[in-house]
Amino acid sequence: MSLTQLSRRTRADQRGITTAEYAVGTAAGAGLAGLLYKLLTGGFGDQLLKTLFDHVLGLLGIG
């Protein structure tokens, strides 16, 4: 195998790795989004948002 053929093969292999990295990143992002959605739409999320909102109002001197 010549150096040129090896170089082309290495670049082709790296393109596949990049695609796989995008796929893993996309799957991880979708999983995190699903987890955050589940947390924030449940009772925990309601309490968290209420506490955060009350805290901000307290800092502003409104609440």
Image (tube, rainbow, N blue to C red):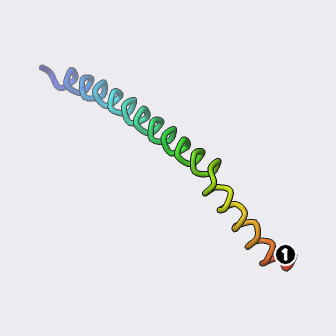
- Helix, strand or loop status at disc 1: loop
Locate residue 62 relative to residue 15 in the image: left or right. right
Locate residue 45 relative to residue 19 in the image: left or right. right
In the image, is residue 41 above or below residue 7?
A: below
Report the residue at 63% width, 54% height from top: 43
For the residue pair 21 and 41, the one nearer the viewer reads as 41
Q: How many labels were placed on the picture?
A: 1
Percent of width and height locating residue 34:
54, 41
Report the residue at 50% width, 45% height from top: 32
Percent of width and height locating residue 52:
70, 67
What type is the residue that disc 1 sits on? Gly
Residue lying furthest right: 62
Residue 28 falls in which quadrant of the image? top left
**Residue under numbered circle 1:** 63
Residue lying furthest left: 1
Percent of width and height locating residue 33:
55, 43
In the image, is residue 43 above or below residue 31?
A: below
Report the residue at 40% width, 36% height from top: 24
Quadrant that contains the C terminus: bottom right
Near mark 1 (Cα within 10 A), the count class, few <14, some 14-19 or many ≥20, is few
For the residue pair 4 and 52, the one nearer the viewer reads as 52
For the residue pair 29 and 8, the one nearer the viewer reads as 29
Percent of width and height locating residue 7:
24, 27
Report the residue at 21% width, 20% height from top: 5
Quadrant that contains the N terminus: top left
Residue 21 falls in which quadrant of the image? top left
Locate residue 63 relative to residue 7 in the image: left or right. right
Residue lying furthest front: 43
Residue 38 falls in which quadrant of the image? top right
